[in-house]
Image (cartoon, coloured by chain):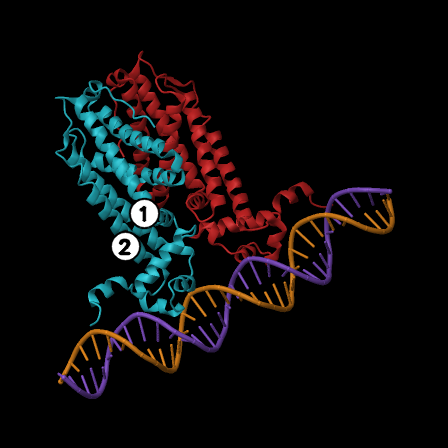
Chain colours: A cyan, B red, C purple, D orange
DNA sequence: TGTACATCAGTGAACGCGCGTTCACTGATGTAC
DNA sequence: TGTACATCAGTGAACGCGCGTTCACTGATGTAC
């Protein structure tokens, strides 16, 4: 009798995986991916230094692999969770603007919570990602810009699916989504760094998003807003 | 006869200054301050490696000195330039909202241009600053957060001086200013990286700022906006 | 089913190099009397 | 005004160390026939 090989395969990490998670762990403690050393990573993974070359041709190569894995998780995680509140969608037109805006506000609140929860759960990966977005390696920077763009595309799709806003074009929504995704990097870092102010930061993020959409609606359909009695969420 | 000593003193850079500008120059070409080496910087400054220790006790020390100098220049540069459009100020109330908003929009346009011009002129310093804001050294990160806060304070003061917006409290304006300063880091980098899209990016930045203020006004004084016929600036 | 061979992840020793740091020293400038 | 001394920015040589990379080798796993 021997142990089922399937289970064993699942449990034993390959050398490549060990190197990647070693890099992740090391980068998470104050340092960036770019500042790690090959020997350092191999040591942390319990491997011989030159085993590194069996799996990656250089350091950017490893960084890319790590980022691809992480961004895949981020996107997947967000996509799974945001299925939940998709009950119907809100049509924002002149029929009952106050009610529609109230419901839209609820969706914004849920979405902000969802993102910040995710960030808090994947704290280390997230911080490393943000750092490399402005980091030294052009390759990693470019990869992370692309991640941000993808997230903004996802958000655009969501907004157009959940809140049907006839007055805003897809280009309008995409531009606002891009701004929101970018600003969320700051809110997220604040959120992680100041756990005692989490409620307040959540409120700020909600207000930020609402301001942008209200501003856009104010420019394109002032009548709607006038009837809607907007209210700031308190921080 | 000998040359006037005053002039000579001005022209000859001290060792400390040479080290600082060497670090600046090196950091500007793809690398961050944190990733520089002591010997590398000294070499670039034309000095003996250990002369470094005559002026700085470690690398963060140098980084801080560089950042203090740069942020001083940034603040001073912005402060000087923004004196110009201070002709009077715009009172935004119910008397003639359309005209007041039109003038406010002009001020936003001028301010965005001013910031982006400054960024383009100090390209290298600016990029290094942004990078260190998310960088490896906690000391530099904290220093740069403070710079951002100061800029947001300055902007708050300006907004309250130039546009008199009776419906927004100082806290409202300060929160929006913080959001704008942060988002401008992204717009600025875009602006530097894509010179062929500068007009478009300027337009995006203007729209961003207007959306926030319009959103805030829409929530607090919907009547004003309804009468004002808002218009998006095209990118 | 067995055998021969190729592939592949991993090892250990060795290389030359640039690094941060320390030491003892120099020469110019500033300061006290 | 001159002299003695202290301070300070700079030099050059030397240190031990960890780094990235290369080499020849091992043993397990997969594949062809």
- Residue B15's place in the image compared with B69, above or below, is below
Can residue A44 be spotted in the picture?
yes
How far is disc 1 from disc 2 in space, using C-alphas? Answer: 13 Å
- Residue B31's place in the image compared with A160, above or below, is below
Specify whether disc 1 shares its chain with disc 2: yes
Residue A18 or residue C2, whichever sits in front: C2
Asked whether disc 1 touches disc 2, contact meaning CB atoms under 8 Å apart, the reply is: no
Q: Tag 2's secondary structure?
A: helix
Quadrant hosting residue B192 = top left
Q: Considering only order in the chain, which callout, 2 or 1, is on the residue closer to the N terminus?
A: 2
Report the label total: 2
Residue A202 or residue D32, whichever sits in front: A202
Measuring 37% from the left and 58% from the top, which residue is drawn there?
A23
- Name the spot of residue B89 as percent of width and height, x first: 41, 19
Which chain's residue wears label 1? A
Measuring 39% from the left and 50% from the top, which residue is drawn there?
A135
- Name the side, left or right, on which A172 lies relative to D24: left
Q: Quadrant of the C terminus of chain B?
A: top left
- Name the spot of residue A139 as percent of width and height, x first: 33, 55
Q: Mark 2: few, some, or many residues within 10 Å (few <14, many ≥20)?
A: few
Residue A126 or residue B148, whichever sits in front: A126
- Name the spot of residue B67 as percent of width and height, x first: 50, 42
- Name the spot of residue A6 as percent of width and height, x first: 20, 65
Q: Mark 1: few, some, or many residues within 10 Å (few <14, many ≥20)?
A: some
Can residue B206 be spotted in the picture?
no
Q: Quadrant of the N terminus of chain B?
A: top right
Which chain's residue wears label 2? A
Quadrant hosting residue A190 = top left
Please tell me the numbered disc located at residue A69. 2
- Name the side, left or right, on which A234 lies relative to A157: right
Please tell me the numbered disc located at residue A122. 1
């Amino acid at each position: 009798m021997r142990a089922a090989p399937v289970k064993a395969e699942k449990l034993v990490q390959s050398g490549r995986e060990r190197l990647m998670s070693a890099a992740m762990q090391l980068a998470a403690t104050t340092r960036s991916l770019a500042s790690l050393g090959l020997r350092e990573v191999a040591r942390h993974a319990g491997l011989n230094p030159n085993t590194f070359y069996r799996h990656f041709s250089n350091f950017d190569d490893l960084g890319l692999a790590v980022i691809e894995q992480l961004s895949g998780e981020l996107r997947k995680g967000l996509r799974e969770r945001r299925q939940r509140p998709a009950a119907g969608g809100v049509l924002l037109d002149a029929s009952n603007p106050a009610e529609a805006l109230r419901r839209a506000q609820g969706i914004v609140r849920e979405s902000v919570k969802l993102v910040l929860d995710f960030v808090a759960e994947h704290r280390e990966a997230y911080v490393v990602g943000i750092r490399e977005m402005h980091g030294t390696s052009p390759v990693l920077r470019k990869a992370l810009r692309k991640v941000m763009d993808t997230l903004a595309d996802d958000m655009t799709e969501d907004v157009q699916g959940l809140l049907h806003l006839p007055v805003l074009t897809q280009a309008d929504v995409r531009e606002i989504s891009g701004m929101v995704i970018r600003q969320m990097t700051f809110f997220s870092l604040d959120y992680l760094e100041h756990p005692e102010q989490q409620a307040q930061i959540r409120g700020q993020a909600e207000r930020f998003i609402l301001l942008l959409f209200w501003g856009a609606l104010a420019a394109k359909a002032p009548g709607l807003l006038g009837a809607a009695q907007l209210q700031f969420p308190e921080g």
